[in-house]
């Protein structure tokens, strides 16, 4: 009888502890999810941006978010807003969809003004995800003057931590990153990759044009 009572008491104790653990885990999940949503929204609400709603027209949505940067931040020349827009789009859509919308919307001033720069950011982030220059060049487009392609090459250089301090490594990557023109769907795409090397050199040199041009001779 004594053993039975002890067993019952133990079972109740274990059950109570499990309930407490479930509540604790549930609370932690709620706090983590809430924190994520807070920082996610703060990141974009800094500029008044919003997430896409299923009943919206995607073209109107992208134009409206680009319009926020154009109307509010164009005068200051700040790139921070357009980078936030690129991150927001990439969190919700594929890069193919974004480029398609940029191509369709280039006639509007809100998109036309800085879609090249925004496409750079999209290209960089796409490389972080896919880690493949050939794949992204095969699926990308020259929307907004090839900004996506240029950003992909920038992302490649950034992933390799390339700098002018390691001359031999940098020279080797400059020579091999774009491969041969026969690897591309069109001569223009190959040209965009070469052009992207120039952007990437400016990216890692903090816009030192003379130094970047000297390194272009490695081609």
Image (cartoon, rainbow, N blue to C red):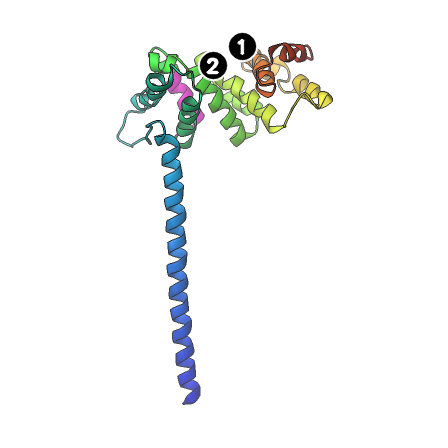
Q: Is residue 4 above or below residue 182?
A: below
Q: Is residue 213 above or below residue 98?
A: above
Q: Which residues are magenta?
A: 93-102
64 within the magenta span: no
Q: Which mark sits nearer the N-terminus, 2 or 1? A: 2
| Among the 4 quarters of the image, the one containing residue 187 | top right
Q: Position of residue 182 (x, y in %)?
A: 61, 14
Which residue is at 34% across, 10% downward? 107
Say whether residue 95 is left or right of residue 128.
left
- The residue under label 2 is 142
Q: Residue furthest left?
A: 55
Q: Is residue 27 above or below residue 191?
A: below
Label 2–label 1 contact, CB within 8 A = yes
Which residue is at 39% across, 46% downward? 33
- The residue under label 1 is 188
Where is the C terminus found, in terms of image quarters?
Answer: top right
The secondary structure that most of the magenta stretch takes on is helix
Tag 1: Cα neighbours inside 10 Å, few (<14), some, or many (≥20)? few
| Among the 4 quarters of the image, the one containing residue 81 | top left
């Amino acid at each position: 009888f004594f053993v039975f009572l002890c067993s019952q008491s133990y079972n109740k104790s274990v059950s109570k502890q499990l309930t407490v653990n479930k509540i604790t885990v549930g609370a932690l999940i709620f706090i983590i999810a809430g924190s994520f949503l807070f920082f996610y929204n703060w990141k974009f609400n800094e500029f008044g941006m919003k997430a896409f709603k299923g009943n919206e027209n995607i073209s109107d949505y992208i134009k409206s978010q680009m319009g926020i940067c154009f109307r509010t931040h164009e005068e200051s020349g700040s790139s921070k807003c357009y980078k936030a827009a690129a991150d927001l789009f990439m969190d919700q859509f594929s890069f193919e969809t974004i480029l398609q919308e940029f191509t369709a919307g280039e006639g509007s001033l809100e998109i036309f003004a800085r879609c090249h720069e925004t496409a750079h950011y999209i290209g960089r982030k796409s490389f972080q995800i896919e880690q493949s220059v050939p794949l992204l060049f095969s699926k990308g487009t020259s929307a907004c003057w090839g900004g996506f392609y240029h950003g992909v090459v920038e992302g490649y250089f950034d992933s390799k931590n390339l700098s002018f301090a390691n001359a031999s490594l940098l020279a080797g990557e400059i020579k091999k990153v774009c491969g041969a023109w026969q690897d591309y769907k069109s001569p223009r795409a190959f040209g965009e990759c070469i052009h992207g090397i120039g952007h990437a050199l400016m990216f890692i040199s903090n816009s030192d044009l003379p130094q970047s041009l000297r390194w272009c001779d490695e081609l």
